[in-house]
Image (spheres, grey):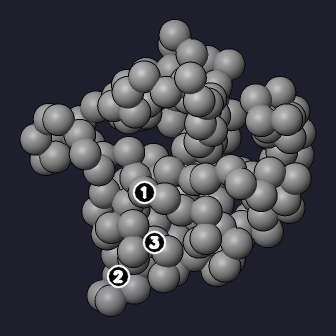
Amino acid sequence: MSQRQILFLDIDGVLHRGNSYVAGSRIVSSAPDHIELFEYVQILVDLLSPYPELPIVLSSDWAYRFGVDYVRSNLPSPSLCARLVGATYQGCECDEQFWPMLSRGAQIQDYVRRQGRERLEWLAIDDRSDGFESCRERLVHCQSECGLGDPAVVELLRRRLRERFS
């Protein structure tokens, strides 16, 4: 039996502080000081450098709302773009319009279940913790207002990456 590895990645509250919204033809930050989107991308790039083969599956509302190709075209990191292999909602067996109503943990666990009989080692980085009750050790939970700008979260992510993927 082979083993696959996946990092599930949220965007808002992880790669930048706060949420984002559409303003005209742009996506902008909802943070009070309107910070730059993707401000913490380099932190993630650096953390993932020891794991060059680790693919990323988007567990973000961005992927559901705008599509994986849109996210890929807006991520300011070629190395992260190269790792993107899809999104959790792709291939779901329920009506896709109901997908956002599921807890984030349920979305990820549904994706894991759909991967079949292969053993899947996974970790999720998210500012949502709903639905992770049975697998809390697989979640690196960010605070929305800090994202990966929180040194304690970065250290936890470094440790969990090492535990799961080394």
Q: Answer above or below: position of 126 versus 52.
A: above
x 66%, y 79%: residue? 78
Dot 2 falls on a residue whose secondary structure is strand
Which residue sits furthest front? 1
Image mark count: 3
Q: Answer above or below: position of 6 versus 113.
A: below
Q: How many C-alpha atoms fall within 10 Å of the one at disc 3: few (<14), some, or many (≥20)?
A: some
Dot 3 falls on a residue whose secondary structure is helix
Q: Which residue is mark 3?
A: 71
Q: Amino acid at mark 3?
A: Val
Mark 3 or 2, closer to the camera: 3
Q: How far from the left and from the top, in percent, is residue 134? A: 52, 10
x 48%, y 82%: residue? 73
Q: Amino acid at mark 2?
A: Ala
The disc at residue 23 is 2
Q: Which residue is mark 1?
A: 86
Q: How far from the left and from the top, in percent, is residue 162? A: 86, 35
Instruction: Look at the image and tell me in which quarter the C terminus lies.
Output: top right
Q: Amino acid at mark 1?
A: Gly
